[in-house]
Amino acid sequence: MLDNQSAEQIFAFNPASGKRLEPAFFPPTVDEIETAARLSEEAAAEYATWPANRRAALLEKIAELLEAKTEEITERAHLETALPHSRLHHEMERTCGQLRLFAKVIVEGIWKEARIDHADPGRRPFPKPDIRSMLIPLGPVLVIGASNFPLASSVAGGDTASALAAGCPVIVKAHEAHPGTSELFGKSIRQAVRELGAPEGVFKMVQGRHETAAALVRHPAIHAVGFTGSLRGGRAIMDIAAARPRPIPVFAEMGSANPVFLLPEALESRAEQIAAGLHASVTLGVGQFCTKPGLIFLRKGNGTSVFTEKLVHLMQSTPPGMMLTANILASFEVGLERLRSTSGVRKLAAVRGNEGQAGAALFLINADTFLENAEELGGELFGPCTLVVECASHEEVLAAASRLQGQLTATIHGQPDELNYYQDLIAILRRKAGRVVYNGFPTGVDVCHAMQHGGPYPAASDSRSTSIGTRAISRFSRPICFQDFPDDALPDELKEANPLRIARLVDGRLMG
Amino acid sequence: MLDNQSAEQIFAFNPASGKRLEPAFFPPTVDEIETAARLSEEAAAEYATWPANRRAALLEKIAELLEAKTEEITERAHLETALPHSRLHHEMERTCGQLRLFAKVIVEGIWKEARIDHADPGRRPFPKPDIRSMLIPLGPVLVIGASNFPLASSVAGGDTASALAAGCPVIVKAHEAHPGTSELFGKSIRQAVRELGAPEGVFKMVQGRHETAAALVRHPAIHAVGFTGSLRGGRAIMDIAAARPRPIPVFAEMGSANPVFLLPEALESRAEQIAAGLHASVTLGVGQFCTKPGLIFLRKGNGTSVFTEKLVHLMQSTPPGMMLTANILASFEVGLERLRSTSGVRKLAAVRGNEGQAGAALFLINADTFLENAEELGGELFGPCTLVVECASHEEVLAAASRLQGQLTATIHGQPDELNYYQDLIAILRRKAGRVVYNGFPTGVDVCHAMQHGGPYPAASDSRSTSIGTRAISRFSRPICFQDFPDDALPDELKEANPLRIARLVDGRLMG
């Protein structure tokens, strides 16, 4: 456990060279965790009272300061993750865009869900009081960053942006795979906090590993957790949070196999095009996306051999790629070995991955074998590989779909008429997934109002929440209602004259 | 545990006579639980596709059939609970009103949170897909009814109404204190299900005790739990749900002490009026409301002795009342004994409660004693008693408020100017409570759009949810999004032409 003496050093490693990167970073001591938690708690009360435009200014300032450091950040991130510069630049744009989108959302104010039910003193049998409600911040939020999006899902990522937008102080436990990148982010956010005159405790970043995360999840000052990572890590955090004297919500996005269903006519008419799209999606970022399609279901028939041949060819000619960390590469290799050793699994393509690089791999099984091993084969496997499940009939496709666990995404390729014919399949996928994609590919999660990035367990801890898109803000807030309050003692959101001019539900009718 | 042989009988007891009421009821066998769960799962898929107006018709039919049985239901409920007929008639109206309100809400459709973000194929660096999202039902919901509202928070209560409205099949585990009343409710709901042509599994009621509830909470078919009851019972359910292979959300409303703060000027100007109102609220329904004010904080000064004398007089002249069950009476007596034996607690009034009846009781302590025992004294105690905490200064009031656990409600009595002066107190209470009441009393929870009946733990398991009011429906639903779907394959809620004419967020703007 943690103590004040033996603070273990954390170094980043360059995945390309395997070499240690300076400097050393240090997990917080017990006292430092206490101080961070106390400051966070103290800041919560004041920060909760900040008007939306001031919180929006903080988010915009963070974006501005980060943008000014784009070169420094992407350079360090490249060293720590081996992700290409172009990708890191896009991710930086996404990170800043996300901060600005939340700034816009909170000023517009719809997200506050303001509701007013006017009094009716003459109502029988009991007079009706005046009741007004809105969302308020939960309190300090712990964010545990992801390794695979070192910018957009890490220190200043969607969890931090939405929690700060909601009015919650944030403590980030940085991912140990990119501590230097995290440090640069942390500095910019702290600078923005100072420039906006926010209490120091509004933001704190700490370095550390699992035990630091666990100590923070247990801490009484923490009111909610945002996490992106593995099922094992997410479930461990859920269990700690549920066992606290005061349990807290955990919003963990834990990934999934992201099944793709190829309907017969689509396969017949555009087998090569679908194979090319899938190949790009499977190997994007060396397969290190939580939305990577890891299962492809098709019905043996016209087009399947064209599809398979094309996909084999593309996978086989994929250059090996550097993975984010040695651990992720090791997990990928264990996963491949498990697939190879499963009876009934045929290897269709396998690129040799040498010197710490991952080679693309493609496997094929029939529906019976999938059903026999649905539990093991249905989980997430990071890396540039996918598994084609060949079904002999539509019934087999439905049986396989029914056995899937909760998924972030499910994808269907079909001709327009086929969607009507396969309503039964769509009905199953609606129950399984947070997002259903038609004639597209699941990688690439748009940051917008309608996005749902989450899904039934084990894709996420709570299917009712999203970790990407503007709806993410509601995770970190709760309703409060005021009964018979005088108008001038109400928050502006609920005052009769609606000074903030926000949309509200007044006596059951949407106004504004 | 449960088996198929030893089905234990359940009898209701008349609290007034202590006599057993016929007939016997039986908890389900293991096989019966399996059948109920399977039917519920099977019904979920079809029921989820029902259009809102058909689900609304089901809710209205339930209300209609229940109303037709008002006399029979209230008569049996009176025997089983000793609650007066007039109260039971009001509760019946509330129950039916609640069902009809949810019917109205689902037809209006705002609750679905439909969102549309249109495609932008020309966007750089990546084209923007068409993304549309809305709420869909979670799946079968387990409702564990309360004893203190045998109609409005039981078999056809708010949890059942909101889950059925959301599109989820419901299994109710009836409270063992009013099995006959529950049976009448169950029959009416089943009849409505048949008349509307719904699959049988849309509704099932079982009798039983804790072990039946626990078996259902563990069952893989169950996707969420609604519970109203004690902290001990609620926490046990939370722990079981969190330990499942697939954890599920638990929405447990577990009650609180509902502190009341009397500001100096209010006390000076209307001490007797406040005492009379508090007395009525504390003793309403023999103190068996989860919103019963159990703590009264005041600052010693002008008006306090008038207030205390008046409250002592009123409490002392309260006739003893019949409690709902022998267990609740026993808990009340244990709680009183704990108060009496706490050093520094003064008994101001104590009505002798004989023959199974509870007598009103009033206690007084100072702020120091409260702070020393905040943990034990701050919890819920069902029954006609309350504790006055006398503070020497405003700082003591704030210190006491800061030590409170999560609360369903917090109440302030003050003159209009005082609210501005005591913003620090209001800020604390906003963090502690789900509902803040001004110059009123917390008992009486209006069923409306803005109501928040919940609060930070331990008042409720999840402060982000309410168990009363129309917002309760969102507990049992989750967002799903559709990417690039052809218009005719989308649910009506998301079709471009908006055939249901519901309010939607289109490209970030509220429409309709």
Image (cartoon, coloured by chain):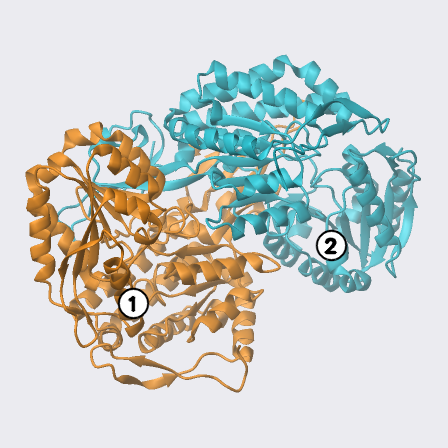
Chain colours: A orange, B cyan
Q: Quadrant of residue B130?
A: top left
Seen at 29% across and 28% down, the residue is: B498
Q: Position of residue B60 (x, y in %)?
A: 51, 19
Element assignment for label 1: helix
Residue at point 45% right, 79% down? Answer: A27
**Residue receiving disc 1:** A64
B432 with respect to A203 (left or right): right
Residue A386: image location, x then y, percent: 21, 55
Pointer 1 with pointer 2, Cβ within 8 A: no
Q: Position of residue B94 (x, y in %)?
A: 63, 25
Q: Tell me the kind of residue under disc 2.
A: Gly
Label 2, residues with CA under 10 Å away: few <14, some 14-19, many ≥20:
many
Q: Is residue A122 visible in the rendered structure shown here?
A: no
Element marked by disc 2: loop
Read off the chain for label 1.
A
Location of mark 2 (residue): B378
How far apart marks 1 and 2 lie (CA) works out to: 47 Å
